[in-house]
Amino acid sequence: MLVFAQPATRMGSFAAPTYLSGLVVRTTPERFDDVLAALRTLPGVSVHHHDPATARIVVVQEAATLNAEMDGMRRMQTLPGVVDTSLVYHVLADAAATEPSRNATGAPAARPAAPPSSESFRETEP
Amino acid sequence: MTSLSRRELFKSGIAAATAATVGLPLSRAALAQAKAAEAGWQWDKAVCRFCGTGCGILVATKDGKVVATKGDPLAPVNRGLNCIKGYFNGKILYGQDRLTQPLMRMKDGKFDKKGAFTPVTWKQAMDEMERQFRRAYEEKGPSGVAIIGSGQYTIQEGYTAAKLMKAGFRSNNIDPNARHCMASAVAAFMQVFGIDEPANNYDDIELADAMILWGANMAEAHPVLWSRVTDRKLTAKTTRIVNVTTYGNMSSDIADVEILIKPSSDLAIQNYIAREIIARNAVNWDFVNRHCVFATGPYDIGYGMRATDKFAFASEKDVLAKENEVTLDRYEAIGQRRKEGDKVPQKSRTSAGRHWLVTFDEFKRGVEPYTLDFVAEVAKGDPDEPMDKFKAKLEALVDLYVDPKRNVISFWTMGFNQHQRGVWVNEQCYTTHLLLGKHARPGNGAFSLTGQPSACGTAREVGTFSHRLPADMVVDNPAHRARTEKTWKLPDRTLNPKVGSDIMGILRDLEDGGVKFLWVQVTNPFQSSPNANHWLKAAREMDNFIVVADCYPTLSGKVADLVLPAAMIFEKWGAYGNAERRTQMWRQQVAPPGEARTDVWMMLEFAKRFKLKEVWGEKSLPGLKVDGFPENRLPSVLDAAQAIGYSPEATLYEALFATADNRKFAWPDPVARGKDNATVKALGEKWFVEKALFEEYAAFGRGHEHDLAAFDVYYRDDVRGLRWPVVNGKETKWRFVEGHDPYVKPGEGFRFYGAAFKALPTGTLDDVTDPKPTPLPGKAKIFFRPYAAPVEQPDASYDLWLTTGRILEHWHTGSMTRRVPELHRSAPTIALYMHPADAEKRGLKRNDIAVIESRRGKVQAVVDTKGRNRMPKGSVFLAFFDEAVQINKLTLDAIDPISRETDFKKCAVKVTRA
């Protein structure tokens, strides 16, 4: 899930922008315990629910930057015994940094028209 | 509560919501946490914007804005999962450079093709569009104007475009980018079964004991389906997955066996499989005798390139010459029962689809040369693999197919479709499954996977092609035209009976001045079409007017004359039909930004500017030679129109769209549940455009084996799309088979009831001997097709194969996915995947910049020798999502002569240091 909520309406303010994701890690019954243990050692990762029957583990990852978040997911994906990881829920805590500003009525702020000439529509050389 | 414990609570809520979404069992307390995390949001169902898998998603809005998206736990397709692209369905709407105003090239306050893009009003934009359209239409008639549409059109968009062009302007120059994607699959469906679209559905994944991928990197191209395949393999341990591919990729990681093959050798391998099925006495004669016939066709069909070299670059001429004559190489000679060096004039270029019945003995004679030794030599793709190991893999592949205890599904997408003999190689897969009787049954079937989200539901079913009408009908069939004219209430002979220009035809027409007005919708053809240098030049330098409607600035926008800002998926009402025939619908969730409008509105607004007297009079149509029509002209139908109640002063909007029947669908409508409608709003009308158009379109298919349910049914809370045909409220999982398909009666077993091409002459492998047509009602055809070599192969000057495809993070040309920072950061540019030894030989190592050049152009890209795609020696790979690396300047515009689909998968390049 990708969430574009303003932090003020969602969770109160945090000290720094936080990238929060809910993921489902899938492994095999044989590697389940190993993977569970390995996930618990990863920085920024908390293990929540798990289902040995289907060898799936729900984790929440938090990271301070986008790059850290992408790296963290890659780290999970490449753990030995991990078959795949699925992104299911994502919260962009500091929505103001990357989202268009919202005014009081909740409508997006008027967006400037695309630059009329050079920037977006440079002549293309064949 | 401290900030820290508030965070912990929120994280618990996220975890619970995640678990709930994928159906993990949760305690009541955990479920309550999940609910708390989502308080105040209004969820509505929708579909993913991207691939043909058709995942269900949920979109949350609050105060009229999108606040969240997630996988839909109730969607049978994906059960709460998304791949990384689908995950960002909400975010694609909010890229920084979203188009919000029409932009036109201007100089001194007027349109000028050499001018700079300037913001204009919709009125200015449409005024110029009308002026330019009239100019082209008056000079060239219906063949001088064109629309390039899309397999990403909603059903309503495709229907509006098809009706406007065909019924309004009487032009068949409308073709979708699906021509580049599924045309070969479609032609094969029509030739084998007489009707389009797969017999099977995704339920087969959980019922299959073996799944064979043919040139389909499912792990990256249909990731959620791949999740289901992986699940099946992990839960039913005897399941076997085979990846038949020209390079090692992520699908190989899960597969039990990777079979690395040379480009085009799929044609030889499938004949080997057929030969083995016969040799092992594994033919299911009961099924074959009751339900199948054997067929074949001509081999001298060319490669769909231009017949003249007038427009060719000097460097292209050698390859172009083969369009008219081919000298057979050793493999072709053996595979086609001829002699090496035979010079074969390509006489069947314009009748490539012709086919006839043969006996089983003839079929057997056709596959006879395809022994294991011969085929292994043709096919082995990794020079370093030992021959006996490769042969063992081929034998084991046959074992999987013929094992009577195994359910087998073959999956394919672009490896088979984007192929100079794409129709042939599609047909061969049906040959395998039909010989074994393993088709159209739970867990068994040849399953053509669709790439785009609605190539099935829109382009194919609605018929937005140069040769098609809705519900599998075609323009050059008088009975089909008559039925369409009746349904559309058109005078007799309104519809143009001459097949129009397909997408490559339209681009070539731009180059030679045949087309002077082009409207591009929901696609980026100047980045995604092959041999691009030709079309980029034509767009900018020929006397034409090109309109591109899109949501972001694309390469096509940049070479156009007018850019129109389009509404995106959740900013409009719409419907898509996915690869398993599941039609899914969504409500508009938010308003389009700025001046962006729906594509449907643009077309309806344009239609208001033309009167019947201007389009239904006599029109020049060079080359028209059809019974009942004057030569080279479409007749005037104005008198007939008046006789049935039309006024010549009526606009196309009134006559074709805002009809009395359509106006009966009132807006607002309770099904909307308070959601808005940007089309209706911009029109200033009170009729529910998207619902009326859907119901009008659905009338074509109901009772004719293409049944769709009523519009409102798809919006019910307990419905997550329905697989058509939907008859008496019940969807159809498996077609053509008794007990599942309502059109097949008890006792029939199977009935392949498609009507197209179901009366054939008879002959031998070499030609027709008895032209009298034999009717074949209910039968499917088992085709013999020979091996044919690619028209351009590596040689001394261009010594590497170039193949192209997609990667997980980006969709097609990246116009949407590159605006999502996470996806862009994951894959910021196109990498040149090559074997480390090939790189070293050229003085290149990983992360160096290389120049890749073909006869047609050159680009630069960064080298990757250790990435996700493991190329064999002699072959390189480039994706096509980055406008800064225009790989289609390199690719060859050879197309399958039957389907007119481009072969993007094989041409020759050289690679050097930058």
Image (cartoon, helix red, strand yellow):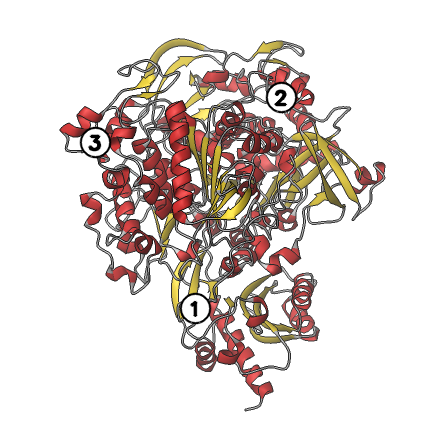
Q: Chain of mark 3?
A: B
Classed neighbour count for the residue bearing mark 1: other residues with Cα under 10 Å, few (<14), some (14–19), many (≥20): some
For badge 2, the amino acid type reads Ala
Q: Is residue B544 above or below residue B407?
A: above
* Quarter of the image with the C terminus of chain B in it: top right
Residue that numbered label 3 is attached to: B648
Q: Residue B496 sits in which quadrant? A: top left
- Identity of the residue drawn at 26% across and 48% down: B692
Q: Residue B395 sits in which quadrant? A: top right
Classed neighbour count for the residue bearing mark 2: other residues with Cα under 10 Å, few (<14), some (14–19), many (≥20): few
Q: Nearer the viewer, residue B235 or B781?
A: B781
Q: CA distance from mark 1 to mark 3?
A: 45 Å
Q: Position of residue B706 (x, y in %)?
A: 31, 40
Left or right: B121, with B528 as reference point: left
For badge 1, the amino acid type reads Ala
Left or right: B324, with B291 as reference point: right
Q: Nearer the viewer, residue B149 or B471?
A: B149
Q: Of discs 1 and 3, which sits in the foreground?
A: 3
Answer yes or no: is residue B245 visible: no
Q: Have a look at marks 3 and 2 and say if they share a chain.
A: yes
Answer yes or no: is residue B3 visible: yes
Q: Nearer the viewer, residue B103 or B21?
A: B103
Q: Chain of mark 2?
A: B
Check disc 1 and report its element: helix, strand or loop: loop
Q: Position of residue B787 (x, y in %)?
A: 59, 22
Q: Is residue B420 above or below residue A22?
A: above
For badge 3, the amino acid type reads Pro
Check disc 3 and report its element: helix, strand or loop: loop
Q: Position of residue B532 (x, y in %)?
A: 60, 33
Q: CA distance from mark 1 to mark 2?
A: 53 Å
Q: Chain of mark 1?
A: A
- Identity of the residue drawn at 33% across and 46% down: B732
